[in-house]
Amino acid sequence: MIRTAFSIASILIATTAVADSDPKYTDPNVILDDLMELAETCEGMSDGQTNEEIFGIMYTRMGDTCQFQNGELDDHVRDFLQDQKLDWAGVDGKDGLWVKLPELAD
């Protein structure tokens, strides 16, 4: 769970913090690993449950998707998601990261 909190904090930085791109996210495999871990965390949540992680980042499970409510998305992660157009993870707008449950994602 601690690793998950740091993964979330790495991908999203609370809006009160200054966001810099994390050099580890120049590797697409690192991005995919962290996104898969976030999807697995989402799977363990109840529908409607909101989690607050490190740096005040909050996300809520709504049905088969976890939507992150705050934080500034790492530039490398945003670019990756916009380019890849994954059906199980994506970004809405500038910072609206979402992931789907692993067993429902194709």
Image (spheres, grey):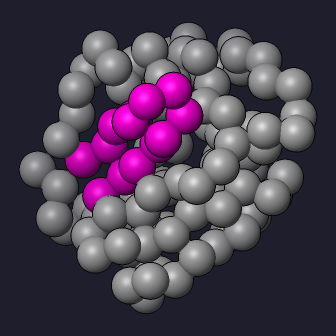
Q: Residue furthest left?
A: 106
The quarter of the picture where residue 3 lies is bottom right
Q: Residue furthest bottom?
A: 46
Q: Residue 92: percent from the left, percent from the top?
A: 38, 36
User: In this image, 11 relative to 105: left or right?
Assistant: right
Q: Residue 31: percent from the left, percent from the top?
A: 48, 30
Residue 61 visible in this rendered orientation of the protein:
yes
Extent of the magenta region: 88-100
Picture layout, residue 27 above or below residue 96: above
Residue 3 visible in this rendered orientation of the protein:
no
Picture layout, residue 20 above or below residue 46: above
User: In this image, 3 relative to 89: left or right?
Assistant: right
Residue displayed at 71% across by 20% down: 22
Q: Main secondary structure of the magenta part?
A: strand
Q: Residue furthest right?
A: 17
Residue displayed at 55% across by 16% down: 76
State yes or no: residue 94 in magenta. yes
Residue displayed at 51% across by 26% down: 94
* The N terminus - image quarter: bottom right
Q: Residue furthest front?
A: 93
Front-lying residue, 48 or 42: 48
Residue displayed at 87% across by 25% down: 18
Q: Residue 41: percent from the left, percent from the top?
A: 49, 68
